[in-house]
Structures are given as structure tokens and as C-alpha cells.
């Protein structure tokens, strides 16, 4: 085992082993995920599909270290998240991970450029405004830099969220239903932009989606059914 583990972590950026999540309810134990074994390579695009309640968002939270499993392990870039405390997991997220959410998660009091600057400023980057403005131009929002999220359409807000996710050039990007709140035309534009930025940055892309068209554009899809891979 000690000789094979380094080889595996070199070729897989994310590995789960026997990953499980249960919660206690008034009706007893609820099994959200069970025995999920998964290997994801650097630069791969992976869609996670399944019915509502199948455990997709829970899996995403566990892979990103936002939640802790009841059983099994999650390893990112050779580091075991399940052996870390919250500060340790947060450090890994800050170093390696970006997020795009269905609800955009922009700070309403900040302008578009300030929202994109935020992760750079938290990392102490002195060039945050220039880098943020440049990437907003890349997503077609040069004319909206100083508009707050309330002044932006849904599609524009999602473009800001994409720029914020990619501005730190993360090794891994998690996206939870990134087009769920958008009309089909705007959603298609966001999908094109997402994969374009993914290719340019060689980012590992992991998507939770109900959109079969979006899933088909990923290199690989996995399906969850009642918390199990099928």
C-alpha cells in the first residue's frame, strides 16, 4: 500500500473511498450517501446526475470539504480532507478550489469588480483590481464593472460568479446547477463560457446538474440513485 499510494495521488486529483453520509432524523437513520468510490483525474470534466434527493449536492459538499462524511475518506491532491479540522479544509479550499452556485452567491453591497476581487484580496494579492477587471472583460462585462448585483441580470450575475470562481485559477471548480436559474439561451452562453475557461485553465470541473445537455458536454458522467453510484 505504501508503494502504490503515491502513484495513485499523482494521477488522480480527487479520490474517495467508501464515502458515506448518514444523518439522524425523527424517523431514524437517513442514508444520504453510501460506499461511494470515485477517482477524478486532473483536468477532467465530470457531471454528477440523478434525481432530486439522490445525494448529488451532498457529494459535492463532501468532495469540497464543506461537509464531513460519516464514513470513508476524501483525498484532494494527495491530502486527506477527513483527517483535517475545518481550518485545514478551509486552507485546501482557498488554495485549490473555486465554486459556482445556482443562486450566484454574490455579495449585494459590492460591485461586480469588487465581488471578483474578493478572493484575491483574501489571498493578499496586490493586483486584485486589475486581474478582476481583466477577467470580467473576458466574460463580456467590461461595461458593468461598477454595477452592483442588484443592477445586473441573472445571466450577468452568473458571469460575475464565473469570473470570481476562475480569478484565482483554481485547480478544481465545483458547480452546483450553474444554469438552474437561467433561461435556456442565457444558460447555453454560460455553459459555453464555463467550458472555455475550463479548457484555458486546465481546471478539473465537477458539475451537479439536471441538464442532460450540460452533462453530455462533460468528459464523463456518474449517476447517483438513493445515495449510491449506479
Image (cartoon, rainbow, N blue to C red):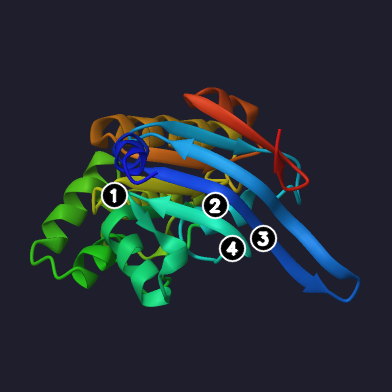
Tell me the crowding category of disc 3: few under 14, some 14 to 19, or many 20 or more residues within 10 angstroms, Cα based.
many
Q: Is residue 155 visible?
A: no
Q: Position of residue 86 (x, y in %)?
A: 42, 75
Q: Residue lying farthest right? A: 27
Whole-angstrom CA distance, mark 1 to mark 4, is 23 Å
Q: Considering the image in quadrants, where does the N terminus appear?
A: top left
Residue visible at 74% across and 69% down? 23
The answer to which of marks 3 and 4 sits earlier in the sequence is 3
- Callout in the foreground (3, 2): 3
228 lies left or right of 106:
right
Residue visible at 41% across and 39% down? 205
The answer to which of marks 1 and 2 sits earlier in the sequence is 2
Comparing 139 with 217, the one in front is 217
Which image quadrant for residue 95?
A: bottom left
Comparing 185 with 24, the one in front is 24
- Callout in the foreground (1, 4): 4
Residue visible at 29% across and 38% down? 10
Q: Considering the image in quadrants, where does the C terminus appear?
A: top right
Comparing 188 with 148, the one in front is 188
The reply to whether the C-beta atoms of the residues labelled 3 and 4 are less than 8 Å apart is: yes
54 lies left or right of 4:
right
Tell me the crowding category of disc 1: few under 14, some 14 to 19, or many 20 or more residues within 10 angstroms, Cα based.
many
- Badge 4 marks a residue whose secondary structure is loop
Would you name the residue on which mark 2 appears?
60
Q: Position of residue 210 (x, y in %)?
A: 66, 38
The reply to whether the C-beta atoms of the residues labelled 1 and 2 are less than 8 Å apart is: no
| Residue 69: mark | 4
Residue 60, compared with residue 207, is above or below; it is below
Amino acid at each position: 500500500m505504501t508503494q502504490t499510494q503515491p502513484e495513485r495521488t499523482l494521477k488522480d486529483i480527487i479520490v474517495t473511498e467508501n464515502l458515506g453520509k448518514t444523518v439522524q432524523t425523527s424517523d431514524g437513520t437517513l442514508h444520504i450517501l453510501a460506499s461511494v468510490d470515485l477517482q477524478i483525474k486532473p483536468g477532467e470534466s465530470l457531471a454528477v446526475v440523478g434525481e432530486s434527493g439522490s445525494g448529488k449536492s451532498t457529494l459535492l459538499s463532501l468532495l469540497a470539504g464543506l461537509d464531513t462524511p460519516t464514513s470513508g475518506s476524501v483525498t484532494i491532491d494527495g491530502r486527506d480532507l477527513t483527517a483535517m479540522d475545518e481550518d485545514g479544509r478551509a486552507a485546501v479550499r482557498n488554495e485549490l478550489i473555486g465554486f459556482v452556485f445556482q443562486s450566484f452567491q454574490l455579495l449585494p453591497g459590492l460591485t461586480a469588480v469588487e465581488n471578483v476581487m474578493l478572493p484575491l484580496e483574501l489571498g493578499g494579492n496586490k493586483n486584485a483590481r486589475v486581474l478582476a477587471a481583466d477577467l470580467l472583460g473576458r466574460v463580456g462585462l467590461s461595461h458593468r464593472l461598477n454595477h452592483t448585483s442588484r443592477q445586473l441580470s441573472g445571466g450577468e450575475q452568473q458571469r460575475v460568479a464565473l469570473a470570481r470562481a476562475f480569478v484565482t485559477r483554481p485547480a478544481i471548480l465545483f458547480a452546483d446547477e450553474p444554469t438552474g436559474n437561467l433561461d435556456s439561451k442565457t444558460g447555453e452562453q454560460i455553459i459555453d463560457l464555463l467550458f472555455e475557461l475550463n479548457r484555458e485553465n486546465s481546471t478539473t470541473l465537477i458539475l451537479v446538474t439536471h441538464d442532460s445537455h450540460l452533462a453530455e458536454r462533460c468528459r464523463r458522467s456518474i449517476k447517483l440513485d438513493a445515495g449510491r453510484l449506479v
